[in-house]
Image (tube, rainbow, N blue to C red):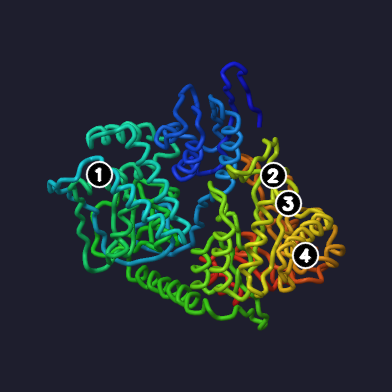
Amino acid sequence: MLFFKNLFSKTHSTTLTVTSSSGFHLRPVAQFVAKAKSFKCDIQASFQGKQVNAKAVNTLLSLNLEKTNSFALTAKGSSAKEALEQLTYTFQTLMHEDKEVTNIEKKQHGYEGTLLEGEIVAEGITIAPLYDYVQKETYTANKVSFKEAITLSLQELETLYTTHQSDENSAIYLAQKELLSALASEANTLESLEALISKESHALKDGKLEAKIADYQDVLKRVKHHLGYKQEVSFPEKPFILVADDLLPSDIVALEESAVAGVILKNTSPTSHTAILLRSSGITSLILDELIGQHEDVVILDAQAGVLVTAPSLSDHKQAKEQQVIKKHQVARSNSKRFHQALTKAEKRIYVLANVSDVASAHVAKEEGAEGIGLLRTEFLFDTVKPSLKEQQDAYENIFTLFPDVTVRTLDVGGDKALPYIDLPGEKNPFLGIRGVRLFKTHPQILEEQLCAIFFASQNKTVKIMFPMISTVTEFNEAKTFAQEIATKHQLDISHIKFGIMVEVPSVLFLIADFNKVVDFYSIGTNDLTQYLFATERTHPSLYLDALSPVVFTAIDTVVKQATKPVSICGELASDKNAIATLIDLGLQTLSVSPKSIAQTKETIRHV
C-alpha cells in the first residue's frame, strides 16, 4: 500500500479497493468511521470526483462504493500517517471478514398452477393467503424534544446491540446507531432530519447500496416514535403471507410475534439488513418484483424452489405439504438431537465443537449442543482499549466453566488486524507480515499478560493453548518456552496446559514428523491454509479460491496421516455439507464450527 506525503502540510494519502461482494455497506462503514473518529486529524474519502468526510457514516455511504471500486483516503494533521496506516488495516480486515451472501440454489419442482419466479431470501415452504402490508401513521403530541428523541433512539440501539451480542447480526444495531449519530450532527429538527435522509437516500438510488435506504428510514422511524408518531400495522390472527414493497429492519420484531407464515418483498436485495434479519428469524421469504395481481384465497410460497404458485392445483397442494413435512422433520430432528452424540452410519463418533468469539457466543454454543470449544478467538478482548489482566482472566473463567474441552488461540492480530495500542509498521503485504505467533517477539508484554490470564483462569483444569501462524518447529518451541518461563516467573504449575498449533502455513505440511515430537495437538485452519496454498488473498476482488479443491483435501490428508497427535479442523470447511463426508473419510474425528451450525453438522454426520 503506497502512502503519499506532502512534507509541508503533513498530508498523507492512500488508495483502498473494495473487495467485498456486498460493497462498502453500512456495517463495515460504521466500524471504519468509529475507528477514524479516534484520530485527531481531518480524514477525507474521494471517489469519482466526490470528496466526503470519512468520519461520518452517511457521507461515506453516499459514495455508493461497490466491489472493485477504488477510492482515495486522505488524512491531514499531526497524526495523519498513523491514521492512514491503522485505517488501512481496519479496512482490509473489514473486507476480509465481510461474509458474501451467496445465491441459494433453487430446487426442482413439479407445480401445475400459475407460477411467478423470484429470488430466495430465506428458505422454506408455506401455504397461506396473501396479505398486503398497510401502515397507518398517527400522531400524539408529547413533551419530548428533538434532541431528547435522538438521545433515546441512540440509547435504544445501544441496548439492542448489547442484548443481542451473541447474535452475529447484532452489528446491524451498532451500525444504525453510528448512522443516526452522524445524521444528528447535521440536523437539529425533525424537518431537517427528514430532508437530510431524503438527500442521502437519493444518493444511494440505483446503486449497489440502494437496499440500505431502509436503514435510513428505520432510524427516522425510531426518532419519530419518541416524538409521538406511531406506525400502526395490524396483522391477521391466522397464518398469512405478507406482501410489501420493502420492510424496515425494526419491522421484523413485530412479524416474529405475529402469525406470519411467509414474506414477499418487491424492492430489496438479499444483502439488505431486512433480508439478513428475515433469514436469522427463519421466516420463509422471497423477492418478487413482478405484479402478483389478484390475491387468491390460498397460495403456495415455495422459497426452496424460488416460486410463488398463485393458482395451485390439488396436486400442487399435495406436493407442497409433503415438502413441508420433510422440512419440518429435518429441522425438528436436528434440533432435538443437538445434544446427542454425532455418530456416522458405521457408529463412528465425531466430536462437534464450536468456534466462539466471546463469552456470549460461548453460552450460545452450549445451548446449541457444542461438545467443547475448538477455537476461542481471544481478539474480542483486545478492542480499542487494552484489557487488564483481571478483565482477561474473568472472561476466560466464564468460558472455561462451560465446557470440559476448550482450545484457546493466542492473540492473532497484526498484518490485516490492527489494534490502536499496538505499534506495527505499515506492510505492503499484511497477510505475510507480523501477525499471530510473530507478536511474541515484537510485543512480548501483551502476550505475557494474556498467557498469565489463561493460566490463572484455568485453575488446574486442562486447557489447550494454540499458537497461530506457526511456520517452523523453532517458532513453536520459542513460543512454548516463553509460556513456560512466564509460569516459572509467577510460580505457576502449568502441567495441565497443553500446547498445539494452527496448521495454516503450508511449510508445516513438510514438517509434521518434527512437530510430532513437540506439539500436543494440531488444529487445521482451512481458511488461511487455502489462501496460502494458492497464494491468493481471500479478499482479492477478482481471483477465486475453491475451498473444495482436491489440493485442500490432499493437504488435510497429509496432516492426518502423518500426525501422531490429535488433529481437529476449525475452518469454515468443517461445516460445509459438501465436505463433511470427505473429511471423515480422511480420518478427522473432531470438527469445530460456528454455534448455529452445530445441529446441522451433527445431522449431516449421521448420514455419512
- Residue 55 seen in the figure: yes
Task: Give coordinates of residue 117: x percent, y percent.
Answer: 40, 53
Tell me if label 1 and label 2 are in contact, CB under 8 Å.
no
Could you tell me which quadrant the C terminus lies in?
bottom right
Q: Secondary structure at mark 4?
A: helix
Q: Residue at x 58, y 26 (%)?
A: 13
Three-letter amino acid code of the residue under disc 4: Asp
The front one of 363 and 252 is: 363
- Residue 530 seen in the figure: no
Q: Earlier in the sequence, mark 2 or mark 4?
A: 2
Task: Give coordinates of residue 520: x percent, y percent.
Answer: 77, 69
396 left or right of 583? left
Three-letter amino acid code of the residue under disc 1: Glu
Task: Give coordinates of residue 514: x percent, y percent.
Answer: 87, 63
Distance from disc 3 to disc 1, alpha carbons, whole Å, reads 48 Å
Query: Which-is-in-front pick, marks 1 and 2?
Result: 1
Distance from disc 4 to disc 3, alpha carbons, whole Å, reads 30 Å
Distance from disc 2 to disc 4, alpha carbons, whole Å, reads 25 Å
Residue receiving disc 4:
557
Residue receiving disc 2:
431
199 left or right of 101? left
Query: Which-is-in-front pick, marks 2 and 4?
Result: 2
Residue receiving disc 1:
148
12 left or right of 307? right
Q: Residues within 10 Å of mark 4 (few under 14, many from 20)?
A: some
**Location of residue 585 by image quarter:** bottom right
Q: Earlier in the sequence, mark 1 or mark 2?
A: 1
Task: Give coordinates of residue 358: x percent, y percent.
Answer: 53, 61
Three-letter amino acid code of the residue under disc 3: Phe
Residue that extends furthest to the top in the rendered view of this protein: 8
Residue receiving disc 3:
440
